[in-house]
Image: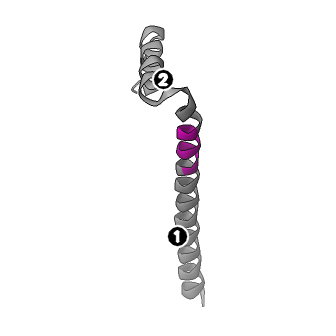
Amino acid sequence: MGQPVLLAFGTNEMIIIVIVVLLMFGGRKIPELMRGLGKGVREFNDAKNNVKKELEDGVNDVKKSTND
């Protein structure tokens, strides 16, 4: 199995990435960026859970109709 992406980066690479992010966005924009990222992840998880629930409901409806 492949190695997770976050573990593929060494300490030097992570430091360079942090410096680049700080230079691109500045210290004041990073919290706003993280809030937006968190909101996006939350919305994705909500949508994923809604789809999962709809699929389970559909399967249960099919099971009920075949048992009747």
| In the depicted structure, whether residue 21 falls above or below residue 38 | above
Mark 1 secondary-structure assignment:
helix
The residue type indicated by label 2 comes to: Leu
Q: Which residue is mark 1?
A: 55
Q: Quadrant of residue 67?
A: bottom right
In the picture, measured across the screen, residue 64 lies left or right of residue 44, that is right
| In the depicted structure, whether residue 53 falls above or below residue 64 | above
Residue at 48% over, 20% down = 18
Q: Which residue is mark 2?
A: 22
Q: Which residues are magenta?
A: 32-39
Mark 2: give few (<14), some (14-19) or many (20+) Cα within 10 Å.
Answer: some
The quadrant of the image that shows the C terminus is bottom right
Residue 7 at x, y percent in the picture: 47, 20
Residue 62 at x, y percent in the picture: 53, 81
Q: Main secondary structure of the magenta part?
A: helix
The number of discs equals 2
Residue at 48% over, 10% down = 11
Mark 1: give few (<14), some (14-19) or many (20+) Cα within 10 Å.
Answer: few
Q: Nearer the viewer, residue 13 or 7?
A: 13
Q: Which mark is residue 37?
A: none
| In the depicted structure, whether residue 64 falls above or below residue 51 | below
Q: Nearer the viewer, residue 13 or 60?
A: 13
Is 33 covered by the magenta stretch?
A: yes
Residue 40 at x, y percent in the picture: 52, 50
Residue at 58% over, 75% down = 57
Badge 1 or badge 2: first in the primary sequence = 2
Q: How far is disc 1 from disc 2 in space, using C-alphas?
A: 42 Å
Q: Nearer the viewer, residue 67 or 8?
A: 8
The residue type indicated by label 1 comes to: Leu
The quadrant of the image that shows the N terminus is top left
Q: Nearer the viewer, residue 57 or 68?
A: 57
